[in-house]
Image (cartoon, rainbow, N blue to C red):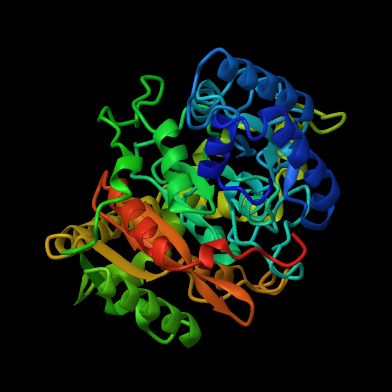
Amino acid sequence: MHQLTLAEIARGLKDKTFSSVELTENLLARIQQLDPQLNSFITVTAELAREQARAADARRAAGEDGALLGAPIGHKDLFCTQGVLTSCASKILQGFKAPYDATVVEKLAAAGTVTLGKLNMDEFAMGSANESSHYGPVKNPWDLTRVPGGSSGGSAAAVAARLLPAATGTDTGGSIRQPAALTNLTGIKPTYGRVSRWGMIAYASSLDQGGPLARTAEDCALLLGAMAGFDPKDSTCVDQPVDDYLAALSQPLAGLRIGLPREYFGSGLDARIGEKVMAVVEELKKLGASVKDISLPNMQHAIPAYYVIAPAEASSNLSRFDGVRFGYRCENPQNLEDLYKRSRGEGFGAEVKRRIMVGTYALSAGYYDAYYIKAQQIRRLIKNDFVSAFADVDVILGPTTPNLAWQIGAKNNDPVAEYLEDIYTITANLAGLPGLSMPAGFVDGLPVGVQLLAPYFHESRLLNVAHQYQQVTDWHRQAPTGF
């Protein structure tokens, strides 16, 4: 049962081939047996899962037939989940149990999903390797000595290892797409505002967006259809009808115009990954697509702009974690100032501290105009590049990452080298565009991902292209040895 996709699970539950309780018990046993190798879970919610599975089976017995009714999933540990530890993989939220469900959690629970647990991540979603977690690094099931990508690395590793059919993630600079690429999954970051951020603990409010990680585009369409939609509790959520993502999957690709940005294929890209990307292009051309060279001239400024804007917003968002109201508090503070300093100093990890300090500096008097305002101006130029490009093409295609998954610890002493792994993904967050990564083959036994970008609210186009590609290839069906 653990090899089944969400779509296959829906058919099996409908046909009564197995029950949600049977499926849940099967996966809980796999998690207990295999997750010690991966460290992908922070919390396993076995009793909650059993309760939800029994309820799902009862709803089906009463005549309900939702596609996700009884399907097991997991949540990245920054989605508030009522009564369950919600830690953001940080010591500073040690012992915090959310008093309410995030909108994403609420919507998926209403659809009948079964929550198997909360998944490991980079602390406060800050990282590209899932090494900054207070609970230890997550390991890539394709090679346990390598990173799974971040910050949704726990979600990616658990799905890739068949501990779950799908999971939620969040993407601030590529944190759904990059781990999807490094673990052979499909992951989609929706348009900013497409999925509610209410109850999703913030890293950078103008960049964060929740989305699904799964093995196929069809499964991502199933999950995104349940996650997306207007939420009056989130002032950044857009009141726009949600497309029928499943219906869009079957559209032919005849006439599709693909843009290949020349900036994606420079010296920073592993040539072997570039070959896999071009092989995907050839397959899509066979399906009726045409290809055009395009330019995104301001892409070169994306990394510095992102690493001013995101830390600045993080500096503001994380100021609420002060040891006063919830989470970790230092022992025997001498006064209020000592309480703040030691609680934050002891509670936050090194990467989070680094970004808070960078962000506070960028927002300080005398530097705000020179750094933060300038970065926002660059952000507008990057958005304009995409608007111009989409006047001539329907989707933009390129590599998701410049390199293969690297060894755990290899970039710990060089954070900038790790930041550069996001070079192809962060522009979509700066512009607010939807982006998807899909499996595109292997190099030396390690997965390669291809990224697709589309205009605002055209998630259905991304899912359609990925689904059609997955009908003529089987990369997405490959599983890591031992899992």
Q: Which is nearer the eye, 267 or 303?
A: 267
In the picture shown, does residue 364 fall above or below 92? below
Going by the image, does 296 lie left or right of 473? left
Given residues 22 and 279, the one toward you in this image is 22
Residue 235, position in %: x, y?
35, 26
- Locate residue 421 relative to residue 453 in the image: left or right: right
* Residue 21 to residue 204: above or below: above
Q: Quadrant of residue 457?
A: top left
Q: Quadrant of residue 88?
A: top right
Q: Is residue 16 visible?
A: yes
Most foreground residue, 37 or 384: 37
Farthest left residue in view:
391
The answer to whether residue 336 of the structure is visible from this angle is no
Number of numbered discs visible in the structure rendering: 0
Residue at 48% from the left image edge and 80% from the top image edge: 273
Horizontal and vertical percent for residue 173?
46, 55
Give the percent coordinates (x, y) of residue 469. 38, 64
Up/down of 56 relative to 211, above or below: above
Residue 182 screen position, x and y as percent: 58, 66
Front one among 144 and 311: 144
Task: Residue at 54%, 30% (x, y): give it.
Answer: 14
Left or right relative to 67: residue 366? left
Image quarter hosting the N terminus: top right
